[in-house]
Image: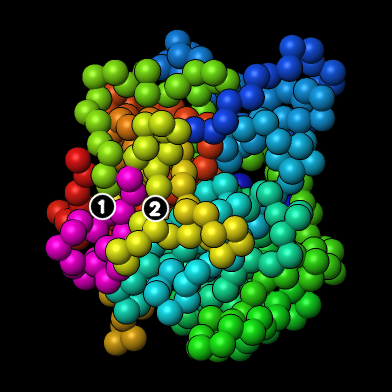
């Protein structure tokens, strides 16, 4: 994969153009059988002072064919965790439900789109035994920029051409896109329709894993992380809970990214929320008055960490296309282990690095191992956020 290091100045300019700046614990085997050949983080991404004094995952090692994931911290096959993920655009409105395969995502990024609903970008590293993922919907530029920070191969069916066409066709964006106007190198072999009686056509298009892999090979994509890859999170070490580092932080078991009153910030249409369960230390997702489930197995979506990332947003045009600043910095709240940790997010090192999350002392926040759901909060509607 091409190196895509971009200077901080370019990152700031890009920000301006965008209008703003519980796992089931598994003991680590005792004997290291081989040295991991993995990307190294930039020097300024070394663990902070807090991380130095609290047990966190630092150097990754291969043990019995497994290594700890950069996206979840969990032990998985080395071939999985050293492979770049895919980032798949998935609709999140009621007429599209239920989604298929989404529970297998390591990270879910949720952000508002036109119509004042949200759309999801699910970041997968575990997809080898899936037949398909979807339904798949169209791209917005702020999702592309977030995917680039994960070094993910971006998968979409459609795009908001005025704001995405030039970006998604750059050499620095490796994408597997359905054949529509505005896509210069389509990947028809990766997509197909699934019969869903009663559903609108736009909710019948899916990404098929076999075809996606063929498309990636045809397009010459490299599945290896860049040597300068920066992991997005710092995770607590095995058998350690991150919340023990935040004993004085307030607690919350119900989390409402758009509140409960309804608003035009993107979360008001279906009023999603998360409920924390102390028994398994997971946050369960609800939406539109019911549990949000995966069609794959009928189980409710649940994650170990929830993040509210506040971003400046604006309406771009008469089509209600939105712009969000996903570079620079802003307020953030991390929910993990029942605790509420306030702080900031920062992303100044260009498109190829992710946003990082820091507490009010400026130290990187420690996440619990497991999946993470990041809600882009339109900060102009941030007053509607609730948790208790």
Q: What residue is drawn where x is 19% and y is 40%? A: 388
Q: Main secondary structure of the magenta part?
A: loop
**Image quadrant assignment for residue 148:** bottom right
Residue 322 visible in image? no
Q: What residue is drawn where x is 53% and y is 81%? A: 203
Residue 339 visible in image? yes
| Percent of width and height locating residue 102 | 56, 59
Left or right: 257 in relation to 347:
left
Residue where numbered disc 2 is placed: 285
- The stretch in magenta equals 257-275
| Percent of width and height locating residue 373 | 44, 48
| Residue 314 in magenta stretch | no
Looking at the image, residue 132 lies above or below residue 342: below
Q: What residue is drawn where x is 34% and y is 86%? A: 319
Q: Secondary structure at mark 2?
A: strand
Looking at the image, residue 40 lies above or below residue 307: above
Left or right: 80 in relation to 167:
right
Looking at the image, residue 200 lies above or below residue 22: below
Q: What residue is drawn where x is 64% and y is 36%? A: 69
Q: Residues within 10 Å of mark 2 (few under 14, many from 20)?
A: many
Colouring method of the image:
rainbow
Residue where numbered disc 1 is placed: 256
């Amino acid at each position: 994969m091409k190196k895509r290091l971009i200077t901080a100045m370019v990152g700031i300019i890009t920000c301006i153009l965008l209008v703003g700046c519980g796992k089931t614990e598994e003991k680590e085997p005792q004997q290291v059988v081989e040295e991991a050949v993995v990307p190294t983080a930039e020097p300024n991404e070394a663990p902070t002072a807090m991380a130095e004094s609290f047990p966190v995952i630092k150097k990754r090692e291969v043990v019995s064919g497994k290594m700890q994931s950069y996206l979840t911290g969990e032990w998985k096959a080395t071939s999985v965790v050293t492979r770049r993920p895919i980032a798949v655009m998935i609709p999140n409105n009621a007429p599209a439900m239920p989604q298929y395969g989404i529970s297998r995502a390591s990270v879910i990024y949720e952000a508002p789109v036109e119509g004042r609903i949200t759309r999801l970008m699910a970041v997968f590293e575990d997809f080898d035994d899936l037949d398909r993922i979807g339904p798949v919907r169209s791209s917005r530029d702020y999702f592309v920029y977030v995917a680039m920070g994960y070094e993910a191969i971006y998968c979409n069916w459609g795009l908001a051409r005025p704001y995405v066409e030039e970006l998604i066709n750059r050499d620095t964006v490796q994408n597997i896109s359905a054949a529509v106007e505005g896509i210069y190198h389509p990947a028809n072999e990766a997509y197909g329709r699934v019969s869903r009686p009663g559903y609108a056509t736009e909710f019948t298009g899916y990404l098929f894993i076999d075809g996606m892999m063929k498309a990636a090979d045809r397009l010459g994509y490299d599945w290896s992380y860049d040597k300068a890859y920066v992991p997005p999170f710092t995770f607590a070490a095995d058998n350690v809970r991150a919340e023990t580092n935040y004993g004085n932080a307030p607690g919350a078991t119900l989390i409402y990214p758009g509140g409960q009153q309804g608003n035009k910030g993107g979360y008001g249409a279906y009023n999603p929320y998360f409920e924390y369960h102390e028994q398994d230390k997971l946050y369960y997702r609800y939406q539109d008055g019911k549990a949000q489930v995966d069609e794959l197995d009928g189980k409710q979506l649940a994650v170990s960490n929830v993040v509210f990332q506040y971003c400046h947003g604006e309406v771009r045009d008469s089509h209600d296309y939105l712009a969000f600043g996903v570079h620079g910095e802003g307020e953030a709240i991390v929910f993990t282990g029942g605790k509420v940790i306030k702080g900031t997010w920062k992303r100044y090192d260009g498109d190829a690095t992710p946003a990082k999350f820091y507490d009010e002392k400026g130290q990187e926040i420690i996440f619990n191992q497991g999946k993470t759901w990041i809600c882009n909060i339109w900060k102009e509607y941030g007053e509607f956020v609730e948790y208790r």
